[in-house]
Image (cartoon, grey):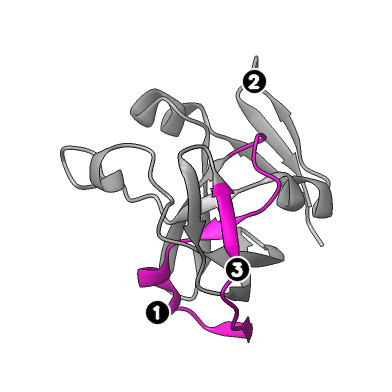
Amino acid sequence: MKKIKEYFQERFEQVRVPVISFEHNDMTLNFLIDTGSDCSFIRSEIVSKLDVIKRIDSDNVIQTANGEAKGGGKVFIEMRRGRCKVQQLFIIHDGVRIWDNDTLENGEFMLHGILGCNFLRKHNFKINFKTMKMCGA
């Protein structure tokens, strides 16, 4: 497998948070890199549009910064960045909100989920906030 070297400076300047994009079939999925989250999350409305490798239905309760929220199970999907493929388990959750509607004013950016520490550890990603670079997989 090829390593992913991602410069997220352009997205950071656009939305002021570290975001990385992956491809899934013909879709671009944008994820917030969240080192404060143990798990990775994906919005429920996007799941029906994905080729899911495995789905685990459950009524898990998630502790968020704003309290508790009910999750909608888990999905395991494959994503691609260039020639590098990664597979990741996500908790389905609608509490993935960063700013109003998770869309910039011009409508060109949508946040689809959060990549937490489980993603960073599994794929051996390292983040350098000085160079705005994330490398791993």
Quadrant of residue 89 within the rendered picture: bottom right
Q: Earlier in the sequence, mark 1 or mark 3?
A: 1
**Is residue 8 found inside the magenta-colored segment of the image?**
no
Q: Which residues are magenta?
A: 34-63
Residue in the picture at 67% in, 53% down: 39
User: Element at badge 2?
Assistant: loop
Q: Which residue has dot 3 on it?
A: 60
| Mark 1, other Cα within 10 Å: few <14 / some 14–19 / many ≥20 | few
User: Cα distance, mark 1 to mark 3?
Assistant: 22 Å
Q: Which label sits on residue 129?
A: 2
Q: Which corner quadrant holds the N terminus?
A: bottom right
Marks 1 and 2: in contact by CB < 8 Å? no
Marks 3 and 1: in contact by CB < 8 Å? no
Mark 1 or 3: in front is 3
Left or right: 90, with 85 as reference point: left
Q: Which label sits on residue 49?
A: 1
User: Cα distance, mark 2 to mark 1?
Assistant: 32 Å
The answer to whether residue 15 is above or below residue 47 is: above
**Residue 56: image x %, image y %?**
64, 82
Dot 2 amino acid type: Phe
| Mark 2, other Cα within 10 Å: few <14 / some 14–19 / many ≥20 | few
Q: Earlier in the sequence, mark 2 or mark 3?
A: 3
Quadrant of residue 34 within the rendered picture: top right
Q: Earlier in the sequence, mark 2 or mark 1?
A: 1
**Is residue 37 found inside the magenta-colored segment of the image?**
yes
